[in-house]
């Protein structure tokens, strides 16, 4: 076992942050469709979270925004002429497609890909696979920039492998780390990787939701496990409960979160609760670790309250004393059932003994909480030194990014602004400057 740390790569909210309500099945996103957003506030809220966690000693890094609008998408769908012409015609003829081209969803880097640390992989390298996100038009091209960004940050092929995305077909629908977690005695120890899926493409008889789409397939999860060279004895696949998908639990990280040897989950999270837990216990026994399951009953927190507050879309972080902190949004305090539950949780003497609360209202209104905003990457000291250093959160980087946001970001974007060619120019200008701040020249394929 080698010493290792878990880096949280938080998505930096982009200058075009807007509420388009494009994600059918994401209740929060739909509830705020076409309302005015505040990109400046959104970015500053996210940066404040990164700064605070870094100050507490957690390894924290930044994932840069993707370029918006996606002119490549618009031109591929027949909108031509100057950039201003493209925006004007799309706004007039196909406003939903225009909104897709301006999608703010890449800020949720839990969907950027799936990561397996070197302690788990056959070749001893860290493996990444960018998610194809093919369930939604507005997300279906994110993997192009996500792969490009991952390869820029993790360029050392002796230590890192960034795979091509899975085939972009329904059978291999992949939504990344939002449906994946890892359990181990410590970050540097060999662990168990846990994949949760919503449907089985090649078995029509398998249970599936009826109202909202299941975005992750078993086949995609199995393919990633093979690509990453995972040991089948330390890999567990479990079906998400189709009934909770139909209640707005569009990803597994809306209903459960894991870290170390702890699984914090709602009793309705899995189609076969006992089967999933038994499989995890058996796999963890192979690495001399015992699962600690923290179960939340429906009588304590109904699914509707879990979704409204994003209780489980939290970060579960290991502290130096061996206990864990749960990073939650303000909405958890504002929901009486959730607030009452959490007060009892930290006083219970269990593994979670601290709550860390952040105001992430701009992200929450668009359908993503603390867990959505971060991609977990476990790195040894040598691997951490080999990645690009310009994205690691420090006080100096925080100050530069705050100044950059205050210079370039608007404090209000309404749906009509998506037709404004000046906004597109502002976004491109801001991101070009960001590449200089982060030391990532040529990051964007304009």
Image (cartoon, helix red, strand yellow):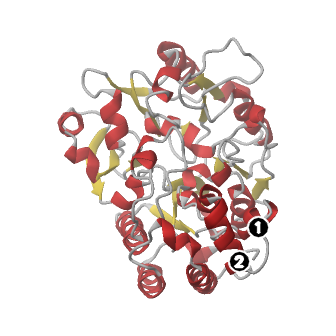
Residue in the image at 61% along x and 15% along y? 207
From this view, report whether residue 442 is shown above or below residue 157. Answer: below
Q: Is residue 399 left or right of residue 173?
A: left
Camera-side residue of 68 and 359? 68
Residue 360 visible to the viewer = no
Q: Are marks 2 and 1 in contact (CB under 8 Å)?
A: yes
Helix, strand or loop status at disc 1:
loop
Residue 145 visible to the viewer = yes
Camera-side residue of 380 and 315? 315
The mark that comes first in sequence, 2 or 1, is 1
**Farthest residue, direction top:** 205
Mark 2–mark 1 Cα distance, whole angstroms, equals 8 Å
Camera-side residue of 232 and 100? 100
Q: What residue did someone put label 2 on?
A: 85
Q: Is residue 90 left or right of residue 313?
A: right
Q: Position of residue 340 (x, y in %)?
A: 17, 35
Camera-side residue of 416 and 292? 416
Residue in the image at 32% along x and 49% along y? 328
Q: Are there few (<14), some (14-19), or many (20+) residues within 10 Å of tag 1?
A: many
Q: What residue did someone put label 1 on?
A: 79
Q: Position of residue 336 (x, y in %)?
A: 18, 38
From this view, report whether residue 70 is shown above or below residue 367. Answer: below
Q: Is residue 151 left or right of residue 324?
A: right
């Amino acid at each position: 076992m080698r010493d290792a740390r878990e880096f949280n790569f938080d998505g930096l909210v982009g200058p075009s942050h807007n509420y388009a309500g494009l994600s059918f099945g994401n209740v929060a996103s739909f509830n705020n469709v076409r309302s005015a957003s505040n990109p400046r506030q959104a970015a500053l809220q996210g940066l404040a979270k990164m700064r605070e966690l870094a100050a507490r000693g957690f390894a924290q890094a930044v994932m840069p925004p993707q370029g918006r609008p996606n002119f490549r998408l618009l031109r591929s769908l027949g909108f031509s002429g100057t950039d201003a012409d493209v925006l004007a015609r799309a706004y007039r003829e196909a406003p939903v497609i225009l909104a897709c081209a301006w999608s703010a969803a890449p800020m949720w880097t839990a969907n950027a890909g799936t990561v397996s640390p070197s302690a788990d992989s056959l070749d001893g390298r860290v493996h990444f696979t960018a998610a194809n996100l093919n369930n939604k038009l507005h997300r279906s091209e994110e993997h192009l920039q996500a792969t490009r960004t991952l390869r820029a940050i993790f360029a050392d092929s002796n230590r890192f492998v960034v795979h091509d995305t899975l085939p972009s077909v329904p059978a291999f629908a992949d939504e990344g780390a939002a449906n994946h977690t890892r359990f181990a005695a410590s970050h540097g120890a060999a662990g168990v990787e846990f994949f949760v899926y919503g449907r089985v493409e090649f078995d029509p008889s398998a249970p599936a939701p009826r109202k909202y789409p299941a975005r992750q397939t078993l086949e995609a999860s199995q393919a990633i496990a093979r690509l990453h060279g995972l040991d089948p004895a330390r890999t567990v696949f479990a079906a998400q409960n189709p009934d909770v998908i139909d209640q707005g639990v569009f990803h597994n990280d809306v209903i459960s979160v894991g870290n170390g040897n702890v699984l914090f989950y709602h009793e309705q999270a899995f189609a076969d609760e006992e089967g999933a837990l038994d499989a995890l216990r058996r796999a963890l026994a192979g690495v001399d670790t015992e699962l600690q399951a923290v179960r939340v009953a429906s009588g304590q927190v109904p699914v509707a309250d879990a979704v409204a507050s994003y209780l489980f879309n939290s970060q579960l972080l290991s502290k130096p004393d061996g206990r864990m902190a749960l990073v939650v949004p303000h909405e958890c305090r504002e929901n009486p059932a959730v607030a009452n539950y959490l007060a009892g949780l930290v006083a219970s003497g269990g593994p979670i003994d601290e709550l860390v609360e952040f105001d992430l209202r701009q992200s929450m209104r668009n359908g993503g909480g603390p867990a959505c905003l971060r991609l977990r990457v476990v790195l040894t000291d040598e691997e951490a030194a080999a990645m690009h250093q310009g994205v690691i959160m420090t006080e100096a980087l925080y100050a530069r990014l705050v100044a950059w946001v205050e210079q370039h970001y608007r404090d209000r974007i309404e749906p009509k602004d998506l037709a404004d060619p000046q906004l597109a120019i502002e976004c491109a200008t801001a991101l070009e400057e960001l590449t200089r701040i982060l030391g990532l020249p040529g990051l964007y394929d304009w």
